[in-house]
C-alpha cells in the first residue's frame, strides 16, 4: 500500500498527458464540427418538438437555433484551446458545462463516446496544468489509465452472453470483410468470427493484467489498437475509437514523447521557461476527488448485474455501463390510445411527432417507450380527454432474430392515468422475454423494413396520398414500396395498400396484400366487398375475384356469391357459375333471382331440366306472376318442346 502511494506521488514527465490533451482537444473540435456539417443542431437539438429527458433533467431544454449554433461553435474553439493547453482547467470546466448541456437535451442522443468525453473533461477539470517539458504526479497518469481499464473490463463483462459467444454481433458488423481479396471468406467464416469474439472477451476482461505487466503490454496495446481501428472502419461510432486510441497511448512510458525528442525521462534535458513542477496547481483534495471519481466509475456499471435477464433485450441499466457492440437492434413501435369513458381508440405513429433518429432509439429502448406513452397520455389529457390507456405494438430484432414484441400489446403503459393509486410502470420488469432463439444465420431484414413498420400502413398511405396530390410521383412511388414490408396492419389498410401499389404498377405486391390477416374487430367479407368495387372499376378482374373468393371463404355472403356468379356467367364459366349459384340458393332459399338464374343454367347448359322445373315451381308458389318467373317458364317450355 505504501509502495503504491509512493508510486502515485512520484513525479514523472507530463509529455504523455500533453499528447493525450492535444488529441482529445482535436477530437472535441471535430465532434462539434460534425454537429455543424451534418446539420445536427437543427435536426437533433432544435427541430424536434419532443425530447426524451434524462431522469431529473426534464428542465433541460434547447435554446433557439442561433443560441445552439453559437454554443456548438464555441465548443469548436474550446476544443482547440484545450489542444494548445491554454488554461486547461477553465477550458475543461466550460467545455464540460456546454457538452453536458448539449447531451442532456435528449436521451436519444446518448452514445458511449459522449459519456467518455464527459468523464475525460471531469479529469481535466481536476488535473493541474501540464506542459510539454514539465512534470506531473503519476496519479494523474494513473487516473487516465484507470478510466480506460474501466471501459475495457466492463465492455468485456457485457460480452459474456450467448449471442456474443456465438459470434453473431461481430459477424453482423464485419460482413463487409467478405470482399477482401483472397482472405475475405476466411475472415467472415464462423470459426474465425467465434474465436475472435472469445479472444476479445479474454483481452478486455484481462486488460488490467495484459496492460499492467511490462512483458505483455506491447502485445496488448497492439491488439487494442487494432480493435479500435477496426471498429472505426466497420461501425459508425463517431470519435470513440480515436479517443480510445489516444487514451491507450497513456500506457506508454510517461516520458515516451520526450524520448522521441531526445529529452531525458525526467523532462529536464532541455530548459523550458514554461516548465511546470509536479506540485504547481496540484492539491490533495484534487487527487482525492480523482480517486473518488475513479472508484465510482469502477463500481457504477455493476448495477447492471442486479437487473437480471437479457440486458441487451430489456435495456436494463443501459446508461453508463459500457456495453459496447453487443446488441444490433432494429425495431418499430406504434401506439394505441383508448379513451376509457368513450371507448374510442386512435392509432399513433411516433414518426408523426418524432424525428427518425428519435424514433429509431425509441423502438429499441423499453424505458423510452414508456416515457413516450406517458407523454401521449398527458397530451390527450391536455386536449380535454378523460382517463386514457396507452398500448404499444412493437417488433424488435435483436442481433438478427425474427422481430419480437417488447411489451404485451394489451398492457396499459400508463396505469397511473386510469388508476391514480398505481405507480408508474417499471419498463424493465414488464418487458416480454425474448423467445426467439439464436439467429446463427442472421435474418437479413429488407431495406426499408424499419421505416415501413415504424410508419405503419395508415401513415404510409397518408404520405402517398399527399405526394400524389402534390404531383410528386417519385416520392409517392418511394413511399409505396414500403407497404409490403409492414408487418402489422389492419385488413382495411391492406386493401388500401393494394390500390396504392396498383397505382404504381406493383401488381405482385398488391396481390399479396389481399391475403393479409384481419384484425380482431374486422369483418373480412365487408372489407373484401369494399375493395372488390374499387378493383372491378380499375379493370383488375383477377384480383377482384380473389377478394370475393376470400369473402366467401370466410362467410357465404349473398352479395359476394351473386357477384361471383354473375361474372362467371358473363365469362361463360358454367361450372363456376353453377357452384356459386348453388351456394347462394342454399344460403338464401327465398331469393328470387338466384333461383331463377340457376334454373336457367340447369335447363340451358346442363340438361337438368327436371331440377330446373322444381326450382321454378318453388319460386312460382311465392310470386307466380313475377316477370322473371314468366320469362324463365317460357324458356323451359321452349326447351322441353324442342327436340
Image (cartoon, grey):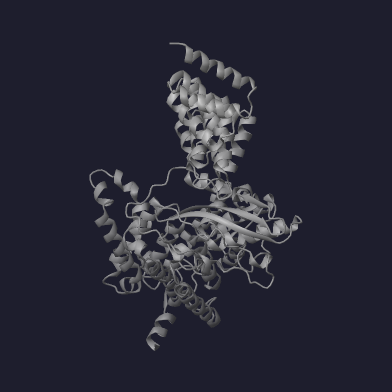
Identity of the residue drawn at 63% across and 59% down: 390
**Residue 81 rendering spot, x and y as whole percentages:** 56, 59
- The residue nearer to you, when weighing 598 against 148, is 598
User: Is residue 494 visible to us here?
Assistant: yes
Count of marks overlaid on the render? 0
User: Is residue 277 visible to us here?
Assistant: no
Identity of the residue drawn at 59% across and 58% down: 391
Query: Quick check: 565 left or right of 260?
Result: right
- The residue nearer to you, when weighing 82 against 413, is 413
Query: Quick check: 76 left or right of 553?
Result: right
Q: Where is residue 168, by image quadrant?
A: bottom left
Query: Quick check: 584 left or right of 576?
Result: right
33 versus 285 height, above or below: above
**Residue 195 rendering spot, x and y as whole percentages:** 26, 61
**Residue 497 rendering spot, x and y as whole percentages:** 54, 37
**Residue 333 rendering spot, x and y as whole percentages:** 54, 53
- The residue nearer to you, when weighing 275 against 206, is 206
- The residue nearer to you, when weighing 241 against 610, is 610
Instruction: Tell which residue pokes out farthest to the bottom in this image.
Output: 2
Q: Where is residue 16, by image quadrant?
A: bottom left
Instruction: Tell which residue pokes out farthest to the right in this image.
Output: 384
Q: Quadrant of the C terminus?
A: top left
66 versus 632 height, above or below: below
Identity of the residue drawn at 52% across and 69% down: 429
Q: Quadrant of the N terminus?
A: bottom left
Amino acid at each position: 500500500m505504501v509502495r503504491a502511494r509512493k508510486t502515485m506521488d512520484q513525479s514523472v514527465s507530463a509529455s504523455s498527458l500533453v499528447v493525450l490533451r492535444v488529441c482529445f482537444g482535436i477530437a472535441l473540435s471535430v465532434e462539434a464540427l460534425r454537429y455543424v456539417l451534418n446539420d445536427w443542431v437543427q435536426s437533433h437539438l432544435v427541430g424536434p418538438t419532443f425530447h426524451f429527458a434524462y431522469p431529473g433533467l426534464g428542465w433541460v431544454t434547447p435554446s433557439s437555433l442561433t443560441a445552439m449554433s453559437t454554443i456548438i461553435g464555441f465548443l469548436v474553439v474550446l476544443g482547440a484551446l484545450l489542444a494548445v493547453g491554454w488554461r486547461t482547467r477553465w477550458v475543461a470546466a466550460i467545455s464540460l458545462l456546454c457538452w453536458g448541456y448539449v447531451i442532456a437535451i435528449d436521451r436519444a442522443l446518448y452514445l458511449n463516446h459522449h459519456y467518455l468525453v464527459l468523464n475525460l473533461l471531469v479529469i481535466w477539470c481536476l488535473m493541474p496544468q501540464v506542459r510539454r517539458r514539465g512534470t506531473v504526479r503519476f496519479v494523474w497518469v494513473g487516473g487516465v489509465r484507470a478510466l480506460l481499464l474501466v471501459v475495457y473490463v466492463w465492455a468485456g463483462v457485457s460480452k459474456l452472453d450467448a449471442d456474443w459467444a456465438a459470434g453473431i454481433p461481430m459477424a453482423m458488423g464485419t460482413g463487409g470483410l467478405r470482399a477482401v481479396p483472397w482472405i475475405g471468406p476466411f475472415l467472415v467464416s464462423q470459426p474465425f468470427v467465434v474465436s475472435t469474439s472469445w479472444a476479445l472477451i479474454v483481452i478486455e476482461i484481462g486488460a488490467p493484467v495484459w496492460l499492467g505487466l511490462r512483458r505483455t503490454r506491447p502485445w496488448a496495446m497492439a491488439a487494442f489498437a487494432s480493435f479500435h481501428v477496426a471498429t472505426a472502419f466497420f461501425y459508425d461510432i463517431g470519435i470513440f475509437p480515436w479517443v480510445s486510441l489516444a487514451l491507450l497511448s497513456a500506457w506508454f512510458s510517461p516520458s515516451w514523447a520526450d524520448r522521441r525528442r531526445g529529452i531525458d525521462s525526467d523532462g529536464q534535458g532541455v530548459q523550458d521557461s514554461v516548465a511546470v513542477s509536479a506540485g504547481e496547481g496540484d492539491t490533495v483534495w484534487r487527487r482525492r476527488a480523482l480517486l473518488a471519481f475513479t472508484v465510482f466509475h469502477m463500481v457504477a456499471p455493476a448495477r447492471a448485474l442486479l437487473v437480471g435477464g437479457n440486458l441487451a433485450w430489456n435495456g436494463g441499466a443501459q446508461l453508463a455501463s459500457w456495453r459496447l457492440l453487443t446488441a444490433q437492434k432494429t425495431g418499430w413501435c406504434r401506439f394505441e390510445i383508448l379513451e376509457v369513458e368513450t371507448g374510442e381508440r386512435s392509432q399513433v405513429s411516433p414518426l408523426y411527432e418524432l424525428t427518425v433518429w428519435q424514433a429509431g432509439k425509441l423502438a429499441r429502448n423499453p424505458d423510452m417507450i414508456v416515457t413516450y406513452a406517458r407523454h401521449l397520455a398527458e397530451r390527450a389529457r391536455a386536449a380535454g380527454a378523460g382517463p386514457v390507456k396507452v398500448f404499444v405494438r412493437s417488433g424488435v430484432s435483436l442481433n438478427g432474430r425474427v422481430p419480437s414484441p417488447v411489451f404485451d400489446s394489451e398492457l396499459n403503459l400508463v396505469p397511473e392515468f386510469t388508476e391514480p393509486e398505481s405507480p408508474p410502470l417499471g419498463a424493465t420488469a414488464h418487458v416480454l422475454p425474448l423467445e426467439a432463439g439464436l439467429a446463427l444465420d442472421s435474418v437479413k431484414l429488407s431495406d426499408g423494413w424499419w421505416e415501413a413498420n415504424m410508419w405503419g400502413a395508415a401513415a404510409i398511405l397518408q404520405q402517398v396520398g399527399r405526394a400524389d396530390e402534390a404531383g410528386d410521383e417519385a416520392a409517392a412511388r418511394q413511399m409505396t414500396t414500403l407497404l409490403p414490408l409492414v408487418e402489422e396492419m389492419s385488413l382495411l389498410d391492406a386493401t388500401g395498400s393494394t390500390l396504392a401499389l396498383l397505382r404504381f404498377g406493383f401488381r405482385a405486391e398488391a396481390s399479396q396484400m389481399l391475403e393479409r390477416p384481419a384484425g380482431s374487430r374486422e369483418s373480412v367479407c365487408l372489407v373484401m366487398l369494399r375493395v372488390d368495387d374499387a378493383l372491378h372499376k380499375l379493370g383488375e378482374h383477377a384480383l377482384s375475384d380473389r377478394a370475393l373468393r376470400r369473402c366467401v371463404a370466410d362467410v357465404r355472403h349473398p352479395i359476394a356469391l351473386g357477384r361471383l356468379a354473375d361474372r362467371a356467367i358473363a365469362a361463360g364459366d358454367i361450372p363456376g357459375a353453377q357452384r356459386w349459384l348453388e351456394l347462394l340458393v342454399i344460403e338464401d332459399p327465398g331469393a328470387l333471382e338466384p333461383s331463377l338464374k340457376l334454373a336457367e343454367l340447369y335447363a340451358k347448359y346442363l340438361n337438368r331440366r327436371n331440377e330446373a322445373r322444381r326450382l321454378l315451381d318453388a319460386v312460382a308458389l311465392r310470386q307466380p306472376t313475377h316477370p322473371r318467373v314468366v320469362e324463365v317458364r317460357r324458356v323451359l317450355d321452349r326447351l322441353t318442346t324442342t327436340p
